[in-house]
Amino acid sequence: MIKDVVVNLSVGANRDPACDYAISVARSFNAHLTGIAFAYDPVVPAASGWAAMPSEWIEGQRAQSMDVAKTAVAKFEEGCRVGLSAESRVVTATAAEAANLFGRIARCFDLSIVRQNAFAIDQVKPVAGARLIILNIQNFATLGAGIMSAAWIE
């Protein structure tokens, strides 16, 4: 049974379909939902060197990233207000560290939900010899569309 769900909140997006989907799933299973938003540390090109970048710029970028993450959390919390056990966290990391960190966080949950940008099915390249298995197709009201869950097995 699914009791704990985690969702990676999209920062800087007007709409977050993964968040909407996670809220629907958590309500369907009466599960606890945790939203994780990443505040990304600024990336300074190696060619420029740290000495060339004013500390005010770096701190400004950090503050802006934190504000965007807090906005994503506020949208998440607004969607979870009625009848749902939920919590949220803002985690600071570099863009390179964020995926690894979310993977480690997700291990503590029964289900993790992340957004994937739209793609055409013919662009998907499974491992040679793998078979596509459709696990589930459901219509969630908050999304207004069907969601297909799929996985490849060898």
Image: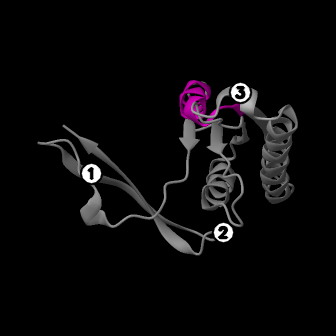
Give the Cα distance between marks 2 and 3.
45 Å
* Numbered range of the magenta stretch: 92-106
Q: Residues within 10 Å of mark 3 (few under 14, many from 20)?
A: few
Residue 133, numbered circle: 1
Q: Residues within 10 Å of mark 2 (few under 14, many from 20)?
A: few
Find numbered disc 1 in the image and state the secondary structure of the residue it sits on. strand
Q: Amino acid at mark 1?
A: Ile
Front position among marks 3 and 1: 3
Asked where in the image residue 32 lies, by quadrant, the reply is top right
Does 112 appear in magenta? no
- When the figure is inspected, residue 49 is found, relative to residue 111, above or below; the finding is above
Find numbered disc 3 in the image and state the secondary structure of the residue it sits on. helix
- Counting residues from the N terminus, which is met first, the one under dot 2 or under dot 3? 3
Q: Residue at x 65, y 28 (%)?
A: 49
Tell me if residue 110 can be seen.
no
Give the labeled residue for mark 3. Answer: 50
- In the image: residue 113, left or right of residue 127: right
Q: Residue at x 66, y 69 (%)?
A: 142
Q: Amino acid at mark 3?
A: Trp
Q: Quadrant of the N terminus?
A: top right
Give the Cα distance between marks 2 and 1.
25 Å
- Counting residues from the N terminus, which is met first, the one under dot 3 or under dot 1? 3
Q: Position of residue 59 (x, y in %)?
A: 85, 36
Give the labeled residue for mark 2. Answer: 142
